[in-house]
Amino acid sequence: MSKIPYKIYLNESEMPTAWYNLRADMKTKPAPLLNPGTHEPMSASDLAPVFCDELIQQELDNDTRYFEIPEEILKFYKMYRPSPLVRAYCLEEKLGTPAKIYYKFEGNNTSGSHKLNSASAQAYYAKKQGLKGVTTETGAGQWGTALSMACSYFGLDCKVFMVKVSYEQKPFRREVMRTYGASVTPSPSMETKIGQKILADHPGTTGSLGCAISEAVEVATSTPGYRYVLGSVLNQVLLHQSVIGLETKAALDKYGIKPDIIIGCAGGGSNLGGLIAPFMGEKLRGEADYRIIAVEPASCPSFTRGKFAYDFADTGMVCPLAKMYTLGSNFIPAPNHAGGLRYHGMSPVLSQLYHDGYMEAVSVPQTAVFEAAEYFARVEGILPAPESSHAIRAAIDEALKCKETGEEKTIVFGLTGTGYFDMVAYEKFHDGKMEDYIPTDAELEASFATLPKVE
């Protein structure tokens, strides 16, 4: 029996007490958010009608390396953290690979995902500011579920706009949000001016995260006592999610383990950015080297086929411009079953790191993703979320390469959550009704043509 246990747990005293701000160690900082009208950098006062005050400071701070986690948030974290780092012994054996595979499991809370790490922080700061409530969007429903839980805990109202395709595919995820007191609206909707316009321009659309963001921002900025909160992409979210990577590194260090490859699924960047944060920090400082892989759906390939340019963060074109890898804010992906990976762009932090060559990216079709998900479920005993299964697919592929070469590499990937609310997707996969849709170059070029002209 190996000295490395199946599950490596940290105790409460070993939990991180500060979030790590990866931007502090970046040689080239992410480009600033721009005012959509003037194309001038956004100031704190510009962002104040949209975001909570302390979150704005975190969003704009490129230099402070560590932010102390408030005691109230640490208390919340201790309900479900530290999360386990699991050695995938069974998967290694089935694959017949010499690779050592570990996964950081973030699904051991009621929201079923890593999203609670930032939801609790954002709800806390909103409550501290004396706000009545918050608005947000959600794709697969994990972020909306996490935020509804956090708002219930801190005593805030929560209004969620859920991407229509996910709203229809995952009614029980919607009901969990309602159980925690949130209102849930399928997006695009007729409840907002932006939603009405999107429906007029794209009749019958199944929606996108960009659409839902626009609606949530409109409601937040037009309702006194409310602010908008986002579950991915933003600098502040990656900051909060760094707790994932900090715990992962602490668990590995406990047993003297150094990973060769770190893999995370990528939609907007919250999980990937959080998982890789301390490892990327070492890489940026020249202290260690790692191969870091972002895995995205072939139907929404922001990294692998997008352009690195300023773009609107939302389909309604009311949010600030962000410099990121993007498919264009008008791009509405096919209704794939990884609802949380349907955003047209990527985190500016991760986009800059990818542009500078510090990480790589691959895209995978959803049938291959579900093949990996089913295999993992049968071997490791956890039913993974479709989003997480993108990382599983890449981890299996890398482990099989090790089998071919005989290399004993150590692979770490993020298992962002469970898939128990994704059974419609599993059903379509099992019934042979799941299709792989990959956008054509012509479709992408048409979307790129709508990118704003920023000098």
Image (cartoon, grey):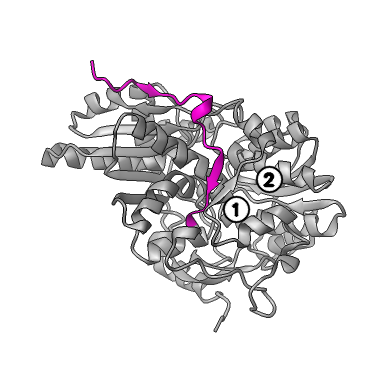
The C terminus, quarter of image: bottom right
- Mark 2 touches mark 1? (CB < 8 Å): yes
Q: Which residues are magenta?
A: 1-22
For the point 47% across and 50% down, the residue is 273
Q: Which mark is residue 236?
A: 1
Is residue 12 highlighted in magenta? yes
Q: Which mark is residue 122?
A: 2
The secondary structure type at the circle numbered 2 is helix
The secondary structure type at the circle numbered 1 is helix
Say whether residue 72 is left or right of residue 423.
Answer: right
Say whether residue 315 is left or right of residue 27.
Answer: right
* Distance from Cα at disc 2 to Cα at disc 1: 9 Å
**Amino acid type, mark 1:** Gln
Q: Nearer the viewer, residue 140 or 37?
A: 37
391 up-or-down from 346: above or below: above
**Residue 401: image location, x then y, percent:** 19, 42
**Residue 423: image location, x then y, percent:** 52, 30
Say whether residue 272 is left or right of residue 181.
Answer: left
**Amino acid type, mark 2:** Gln
| Residue 87 visible to the viewer | yes
For the point 76% across and 35% down, the residue is 154
Which quadrant of the figure has residue 175? top right
For the point 26% across and 44% down, the residue is 260
Ranked by sequence position, the earlier of labels 2 and 1 is 2
The furthest residue to the bottom: 455
